[in-house]
Image (tube, rainbow, N blue to C red):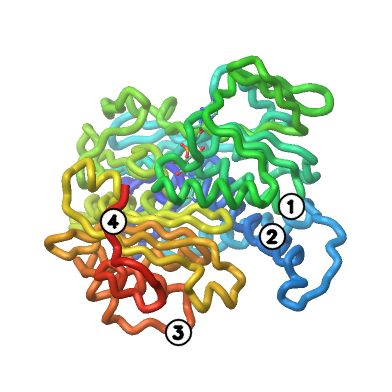
Amino acid sequence: MTYDVAILGAGPGGYVAAIRGGQLGAKVCLIEEGELGGTCLNRGCIPSKSYYESAQRMLGVRDGAEFGVRAALEAFDLAACKGRKDRVVEELVGGIGKLLAGHGVDVVHGRGVLTAPDAIQVATADGGSVAVSARNVIVATGSRPADIPGLPVDGARILTSDQIWSLEELPESMVIVGGGVIGCEVAHAFSAFGTRVTVLELVDRLLFTEEKEASRAVQRALTDQGVTVRTGVRVASAAARSNGAVVTLEDGAEIAADCVVVAVGRIPNTAGVGLEDVGVALDERGFVQVNDEMETSVPGVYAVGDAVGRFMLAHVATSEAMVAMHTCLGKPYWMDYDVVPYAVFTKPEVAGVGAKEADLKEQSIPYKVGRFGFGASGKAAAMGAPEGFIKLLSHAETGRVLGATIVGAHASEVIHEVTLAMRMEASPGDLVTTIHVHPTISEVVLEAGEDTMGLAIHKLGRPSRKED
Ligand code: NAD
């Protein structure tokens, strides 16, 4: 049988494409060598958010007395936390299996290699081989943690973000190499659990792609939580020892810990799957090159998600998968790379969408800033979460919302209001005249809209102005 579409990889790009294909009546084959759900479900988003919730409960017990809850904290049980995470993952992976079956998707377990633009040879787990032929192929093979020379990952003392979710015993100390998204999220969770965490970051601030004030807020919060943050330091090497590991900095200084987590970025899984053999063009870093329809240099072969690497985010993979699958089936579909929300799950959370202030300056786009601090939010005060702010950017002439950064409680949820505002070409005025439930964190969006006009109700001081 020839399938309409064969998909390599069952992460949030591949499995979503498969379900949509099934919904649209296509005959779809999904090929996966590991678990359904890919990195997101098994080693990324879901495990980390499961641990994040454990971290919030630890922090909640610690400051419980302030809320009238006096409880003694006995211990943190990492094995129980992991067990809960395993059950969450198992349930979600099982759910995906049911959805795929319900939509008539054939799932082939094994490693697939393109042998022609319309043919995939799959080496199955039982040592067999299956030939899959399809009119279209979607490559959704994802990415894996990058390693750097001198940091030999062994899965025991020197770990990647794939491996930390298998730890059964809480390390007393941990050094994290890299203060990006993974480094900050892991530092927040494990430090809340009770591990003594040190973050070593090469550039001069954590989360360096964020607005500077967001980086500062996260660094301050992690430091307050007890994390040692060192920026502007390059890790040269690491070595496992019988009782832990030692990291050596470029200047020769050594830092010892029970374990080292290497979180220095991710690289695409695009080698060894036959892409170059069938003529698919990759860039110099191994990412698949695609056009706006996610089609590669070979007609009928599409690629999505981390293998393309425009944004290494599960939800971008999902959107790209929609574009690719719809295009395969001759149905137009679109996505907007200018309006990609994202979040970093530390405490406070960081979320953003659209432009950053530096981008607007660089492009000489006239803009206005609306700011509002969580300290003046009634809901944030009641929650005991006054840390944070929103910075809302809009075009000084057209009034269109251009972007926002939110740092604070529920930032990862509140960002969607700004995201939709951008999609709808709304202005701060539209946000201001939209009635918001009181008391909610979302009111900060309304106040930031008002502040753009110098009229925020719960803020004293001069109207907002451009800041450096
Ligand atoms: P990253 O690129 O965000 O951060 C890596 C950091 O490591 C950088 O700040 C870099 O300067 C630093 N670094 C590199 N070499 C170093 C060295 N020798 N010594 C010290 N520091 C060094 O990468 P990540 O945190 O590994 O995340 C990988 C990808 O996964 C990212 O694209 C991220 O967006 C994505 N991700 C997203 C989420 C989320 O959306 N919540 C969560 C996890 C991961």
Residue 445 lies in what quarter of the image? bottom left
Q: Is residue 51 visible?
A: yes
Q: Earlier in the sequence, mark 1 or mark 4?
A: 1
Q: Which residue is mark 4?
A: 339
Q: How many marks?
A: 4
The numbered dot on residue 438 is: 3
User: Regarding mark 1 in the picture, which secondary structure is present there?
Assistant: helix
Give x and y (percent) for residue 215. Answer: 48, 46
Q: Is residue 342 left or right of residue 96?
A: left
Q: Is residue 357 left or right of residue 330?
A: right
Mark toward the start of the polypeptide (3 vs 2):
2
Determine crowd level at label 4: few under 14, some 14-19, many 20+ residues with C-alpha closer than 10 A.
Answer: some
- The residue at which mark 1 appears reads as 193
Q: Residue at x 76, y 78 (%)?
A: 68
Distance between the alpha carbons at the discs numbered 3 and 4: 27 Å
Query: Which of the marked residues, 1 or 2, is nearer the chain's N terminus?
Result: 2
